[in-house]
Amino acid sequence: MNGTRTMMDFLEEPLPGVGTYEDFNTIDWVREKSRDRDRHREITNRSKESTWALLHSVSDAFSGWLLMLLIGLLAGSLAGLIDISAHWMTDLKEGVCLAGFWFNHEHCCWKSNTTFTDRDKCPEWKSWSQLILGHGEGAFAYILNYLMYVIWALMFSLLAVLLVKGFAPYACGSGIPEIKTILSGFIIRGYLGKWTLVIKTITLVLAVSSGLSLGKEGPLVHVACCCGNILCHLFTKYRKNEAKRREVLSAAAAAGVSVAFGAPIGGVLFSLEEVSYYFPLKTLWRSFFAALVAAFTLRSINPFGNSRLVLFYVEFHMPWHLLELVPFILLGIFGGLWGAFFIRSNIAWCRRRKTTRLGKYPVLEVLVVTAITAVLAFPNEYTRMSTSELISELFNDCGILDSSKLCEYVNDFNSTKGDDLPDRAAGPGVYTAMWQLALALVMKVFITIFTFGMKVPSGLFIPSMAVGAIAGRLLGVAVEQLAFYHHDWAIFSGWCSQGADCITPGLYAMVGAAACLGGVTRMTVSLVVIMFELTGGLEYIVPLMAAAMTSKWVADAIGREGIYDAHIRLNGYPFLEAKEEFSHKTRAMDVMRPRKNDPPLTVITQDAMTVEDVEAIVSSTTYSGYPVVVSRASQRLVGFVLRRDLIISIENARKKQDGILRSILDLSPFTVTDETPMEIVVDIFRKLGLRQCLVTHNGKLLGIITKKDVLKHIAQMANQDPDSILFN
Amino acid sequence: MNGTRTMMDFLEEPLPGVGTYEDFNTIDWVREKSRDRDRHREITNRSKESTWALLHSVSDAFSGWLLMLLIGLLAGSLAGLIDISAHWMTDLKEGVCLAGFWFNHEHCCWKSNTTFTDRDKCPEWKSWSQLILGHGEGAFAYILNYLMYVIWALMFSLLAVLLVKGFAPYACGSGIPEIKTILSGFIIRGYLGKWTLVIKTITLVLAVSSGLSLGKEGPLVHVACCCGNILCHLFTKYRKNEAKRREVLSAAAAAGVSVAFGAPIGGVLFSLEEVSYYFPLKTLWRSFFAALVAAFTLRSINPFGNSRLVLFYVEFHMPWHLLELVPFILLGIFGGLWGAFFIRSNIAWCRRRKTTRLGKYPVLEVLVVTAITAVLAFPNEYTRMSTSELISELFNDCGILDSSKLCEYVNDFNSTKGDDLPDRAAGPGVYTAMWQLALALVMKVFITIFTFGMKVPSGLFIPSMAVGAIAGRLLGVAVEQLAFYHHDWAIFSGWCSQGADCITPGLYAMVGAAACLGGVTRMTVSLVVIMFELTGGLEYIVPLMAAAMTSKWVADAIGREGIYDAHIRLNGYPFLEAKEEFSHKTRAMDVMRPRKNDPPLTVITQDAMTVEDVEAIVSSTTYSGYPVVVSRASQRLVGFVLRRDLIISIENARKKQDGILRSILDLSPFTVTDETPMEIVVDIFRKLGLRQCLVTHNGKLLGIITKKDVLKHIAQMANQDPDSILFN
């Protein structure tokens, strides 16, 4: 029963530091899970002894649920706060409310008691020119407004980049690549800490308000994960165990997407499909709970002022026709091309930033991009409004009362039946809108490439969706006009007679948005489910799915990696992709160290070594672990010991004159034979979450394969630079 | 490069039979996946050689999608066929349509040109008494109808049980326990074959029409999986690989649930959460596609005649109040208790059937249960109608025009505003309905225990939901009346004033249904998502989730296993549960064979053995595989060889004078040390899908652990009979 004792000792009287990890290192999933099971077992055993212990056991069992509840509440509240602040500050760029400067434009006009004709032109809301000059007409007023717009934008973005640079460098970007890596078992201290949370929340509001081409959805996932990580500290079960904590982070990621789009089911699927690595089914249920709590917390804060849960609520009335699949698939192809183009250009630009002098001036870079964005954005009303407002407007199906320019059709009220408007000829407003949208599309396509990756929080969902939504709306209006003027063509006959409402341009916008988002992120099921939750109608799943599928195929044909994976590789994080099959015919012996002509493997022998011998080995090498063998001659494997544990143990041995290896030796190291195909080795590393694996031949120890070796080998086989893998 | 050659030989010129499995055996996931990767690699390599090979490679890549499309189409069509037939035959028990005997009651009255007062009493539809006696009034007519009802029911069920018994014994039951086992890697030949498909489809219609307390939803999953399995034969990629085929079956299961409830997302989650074992993310996307195609195929067949995708479409208008969570949680407790009670009683009854003479008379058993069900069901209109109709009616929110007895409230049209009816006093119709529903509840609770497990296709979803829906509606009406008569009570003040519509009894029915279904099956996320897809409103997710959570906790506290797991254990299938953590402190050495005092492990030595030696070992033992060592003295492990392959190879060696072991030796067997905790061993078996694992100590072979050993050990640790595990 020696092994059992060893483990008990390990539990009962741990040496301080044994079992923890260094920064930028990979955790050992097997060990962490074992430790949690030991802990659980002990609590269960003790619970039979006293009522107090029983209560402890029950509270331990429910602590996971409590934690989920807290995460949901906190993430939902923060999301509400961010929404409200961003909305107010975005409007601040254009003017201020006299009834109270803390009201945003919409809110200001709600509070207004006076009557006014245009919905959003109440007397209480003053544009900057009205406030300063006393009137809002003429070229000078326009220029003044323009100037104020640019100045506010620059101020917001300057503050954001200074805060990020000064207090929390990890707060920049979307955070999803890093969260994926952390969830796969990597340690980045401080990445999910309280400073990151505070600074990211504040700077996210600033960055969104500055009008840069970025969204808050990705960073919200980071914010929710920070909440999860911080709240973990309240419960020993999660604080002390890296594997358990990652279960919580998976759920927190789901809550983040849930509040970003108001789509709890989509959020859970996003976490499952996109970010999580280890996702036991128990976590699925808890994630769902956290996502739901977060969504309802956000709704009770009601930041959009319409009691709607979802970010872009749309209701379409008309079914779509099978022939419309052709334009939908075209949008899919566009989305795929855009996704592949964006990833390539953005990665090339980010690499340039990393390797040239450009990276040394992050503040200047942000200011220049903000200035360009603001200067280009103001003259075009579709880029001046916030991107999420733009998407809302593009998704919208024109009703009778819509005053938007996009709905300025030539009216023929005789043929109107109820709320359904027939297809009509586009009026001048629609044509103007088309031009403006086309310009907005070009601008968004290019500016987003330079924006994503700067030293401010920046999400990709909203800009990608905007690109797709614009393209979709353009195509939708084109098809609509085609159907209106040429309803006698063969392709329209049978389903689109004169005076019928056949084409819904808003649906095209939605399909386009899904296609572009899919092309960039390579999401599949979660994308369709998020979009489904926005409309609530199963009807429109088929177009969305067709576009998402096409987009993924097209983008995959050009480059296999999604944007997050590309950024992971750019940063050299040790992420072992769970979705890609390793399909080369190499074997363990081709990957293991020592290679041919290398010096033999450094091993520790079981008995014939003094503390000094061990110390000499540790100080003369830098490996993070050493196999332990019976004797150097036989090379028969006994176990494995980690460098970090060994160093702590040597110190301890000096003080207490205790055995070194007794309590830190892992007697059950994973082994494979040298003939094992690498595809199986990769599978084992993935599924069990190993850090290292020993290689034997006919029972003799031959070498070792670490996670880094595996990643380097995969990179090499894919004709990539193996030295891009930086961490262990 | 010997290993590579070995594998190439294995691919290029396989001995017939090598690499296949016997009936009632477990597959080796690692080997199957390796084989598929080899196959894929070869096709990719060849694709560079010629255009034809390139086309082959492309068609191979898309064959998965094509297969999904076909499965969706076939499963959707079969579901439509089953729906239509079952509807017609259920009505046949009560009467016949004069306008054409092939019309069901509803359809018959649609076709009618004459005017008639009551919606479903058209002159074309004749009850049996009207047809035979010429009138439908009086005691004699009632008795005649009663008699015809019972006779038809007996005929249907007799035919069903005879067909199952004579042609496809695997067609009985719901099939989900077996499908779970098959998906985990077990082989049951014919379980998903064409005969099972044909007979199950026919007998499912008969069983549902006979009025037995069973549903068609579970069996539809089996039917869809049969479709998947049969369609696999069209594609080499899936026909020849057991692992790839199981990916398809997972998707087919999703399609099955998708058509059963009209809930594609819920179906995919059901497959992921409940039935699938190996579910790579690639499969998630394909499953979703299959589920969607199936759902839309079913909708275009339109069996319910209302263009609705979902089985029970409901639309609620009123939000719920936080205080209503109390009755919802009560329903959750009821659901959990019912689930635990049902599982215990049903398993006890099934065990009795297996062990006593009862099991020898399946036909008689079915006839007796049908007779009792029919005799008890006819007098009560809520048991006489089909169970899905009953559930529909219970879920329904009473509108102004509803003629159902459940909606016979005391009307006060002055207070009616629009479509929203205020809470009203229950009329005599409601009170009668309450009594009848209470009786129906008692009957369903008991008769279902005896029905599930008989030799006819029988699903559990619908009866479980019916029990919950009745209980929920009863509670809902009770709360509603309480709120109506006592709206001045403190608990109602503030949200339920006089004349307001506060309580929706239909929502209570729905929550009750979810709770009971959850208690029996222990589904969580998929249950809530299926229910969400029925209503389409995120509003009602919280009540559903509260009830489902409570129900699962209560049921788990009484007994850990869901009904499907209980049936798997009853049948002794080798199913390694992926959800349960193994939490005992045993080690590999405690589980491996040989045990202490056993004769030593039978091994084959690498070189010093003749064909005759090997043959002697094979014929003197019954193990399904043998470790290969360097020499008996050193016990250093070389590889592992399967008995089945060895026998084939010996035959072949005789004919061709070839080496035995060369092409069948697995040079990369999985090994663990004797000190490895069993929790890690169980994890490895689960995640990698192993059949066996060798145990070493300091590099020397000590013993072997098979999947059966693991399962027996788990059973033993849970104080269950280890000999209940029958298969390997």
Image: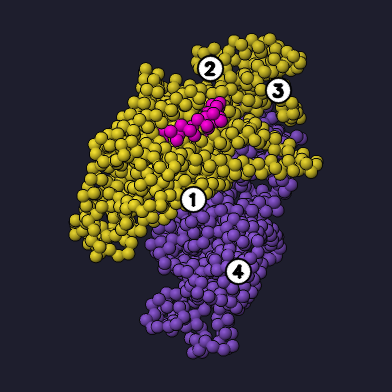
Chain colours: A yellow, B purple
Mark number displayed over residue A594? 2
Label 2, label 3: how many angstroms apart (C-alpha)?
32 Å
* Image quadrant where residue B667 sits: top right
Please report whichever mark, 2 or 3, sits nearer to the chain's N-terminal start: 3
Callout in the foreground (1, 2):
1
Q: Is mark 4 on a helix, strand or loop?
A: helix
Q: Do the residues labelled 4 and 1 touch (CB within 8 Å)?
A: no
- Binning the other alpha carbons within 10 Å of mark 4 as few (below 14), some (14 to 19) or many (20 upward) gives many
Q: Between tags 2 and 4, which lies in front?
A: 4
Q: Which three-letter amino acid code belongs to the residue tagged 4?
A: Phe
Q: Overall secondary structure of the magenta stretch?
A: helix
Q: Residues within 10 Å of mark 3 (few under 14, many from 20)?
A: some
Residue B142 in the image, given as x and y percentages of width and height: 57, 85
Residue nearest the observer in this picture, B411 or A642: B411
Q: Name the residue under label 3.
A: A15
Report if the CB atoms under discs 2 and 4 are less than 8 Å apart.
no
The residue identified by callout 1 is B268
Figure label count: 4
The residue wearing badge 4 is B484
Disc 3 versus disc 4: nearer the observer: 4
For the residues labelled 3 and 4, say whether their Cβ atoms are less than 8 Å apart: no
The span from disc 4 to disc 1 (Cα, nearest Å) is 42 Å
* In the depicted structure, whether residue A282 falls above or below residue A672: below
A489 relative position to B513: left or right: left
Between tags 4 and 1, which lies in front?
4
Q: Which residue is drawn at 25% across and 45% down?
A: A434
Q: Position of residue A146 (x, y in %)?
A: 30, 34
Magenta highlight on residue A79: no
In the image, is residue B121 above or below residue A587? below
Rounded to the nearest angstrom, the CA distance separating label 3 from label 4 is 66 Å
In the rendered image, residue B697, in percent from the top left (x then y), is placed at 68, 27
